[in-house]
Amino acid sequence: MKLLESKINMKYIKYIVIIIVLGSFITYKYLNFGVNPSINSSVQYPFGSIYYKGRLLARNYDKTLEWYVKIPDTDDAEAQYNAGLVYDVVYNDYVKALEWYLKAVKQNLPDAQNNIGIMYLHGNGVTKDAHKAAEWFQKAAEQGYAFAQHNLAVMYLEGLGVIKDYGKAYQLNNQAAKQDVLLAQYNLWLAYSYGWGITKDESMARKWLTKFKKSAKTNAEFQYGAGVFYQYGFEFTKSISKAKKLYEKAAKQGHVCAKARLEEISEGREPPLIPPL
């Protein structure tokens, strides 16, 4: 009975959200309160988000940008980051992506700091520079951003842009793994198995390997990453059909990059030289 009540409530909530968003749109479209940026952004961000996530309206990345870029530079960091993400992942326009990430970074958004680090690591829209990549990962990691913690851990493991340090790598992977970053859990299994930055411990190694395997079955990031390996032929034999199946699983969980890769496959477009991970 409680489940039924929950479904009914969600139904009404959906209608309420639609009414609020449409009401905001009418206010913006016809009254155009341009003197108050906060009013505009409150309308623009929900509509950009709806087009971006494909909720209520069909997913339309051009419309996403149309709404996001109307937001003032000093206004909504999340919207600025999302605009950068669309330029980065969907259009592979790294110059524009960097422009929007930097706007979000002015408000100290760790998601944007992390993605700028990835751009420097791969040389997307900027000169390839592992040291600068590590610096950007560090900024995001200091804010507790789990993916940046993992990325920085990999830099320390490989000695990319920093002096190789298994101890720091272990600490960062441990922080990220506790926030359910799948590859950090995998790296902790390796750390405990081989004594990388920590004393060898078979029981702890088994613990993290078990957690990794359990998470991997339903984790969208893992499914997307495996899809990339199949699409590009990294480590695995290249297989577009297997890549598509994995992308579809990740896309059902809302993974933006997986959706972009599926669109490339369905339209027969060439994927970017360096896949966004």
Image (tube, rainbow, N blue to C red):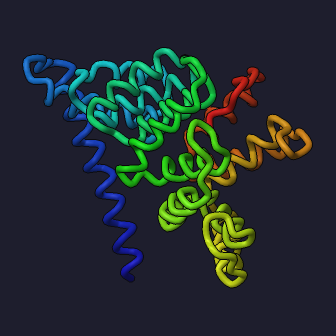
Query: Residue 120 falls in which quadrant of the image?
Result: top right
- Which residue is pictured at 56% across the width and 46% down the height? 151
Number of marks present in the image shown? 0
* Side of 173 where 206 appears, left or right: right
Position of 101 compared to 212: left or right?
left
Residue 182 spot, x, y in % from top left? 61, 60
Q: Residue 97: x, y in percent?
A: 47, 22
Q: Which residue occupies the extreme left position in the image? A: 35
Relative to 16, does residue 80 appear above or below in the rendering? above
130, 210: nearer the viewer: 130
**Quadrant of the image occupied by residue 131:** top right
Q: Residue at x 7, y 18 (%)?
A: 35
Res. 142 visible in picture: yes
Which residue in the rendered view is the most extreme toward the front? 163
Residue 92 seen anywhere in this rendered image of the structure: no
- Image location of residue 233, percent across then percent down: 85, 38
Q: Nearest the camera: 95 or 160? A: 160
Q: Position of residue 179 (x, y in %)?
A: 48, 63
Q: Quadrant of the C terminus?
A: top right
User: For this view, does 95 lie left or right of residue 31?
Assistant: right
Q: Is residue 270 above or below residue 225?
A: above
Image quadrant for the N terminus? bottom left
Give me the residue at 46% from left, 16% from top. Answer: 96
Residue at 33% over, 31% down: 104
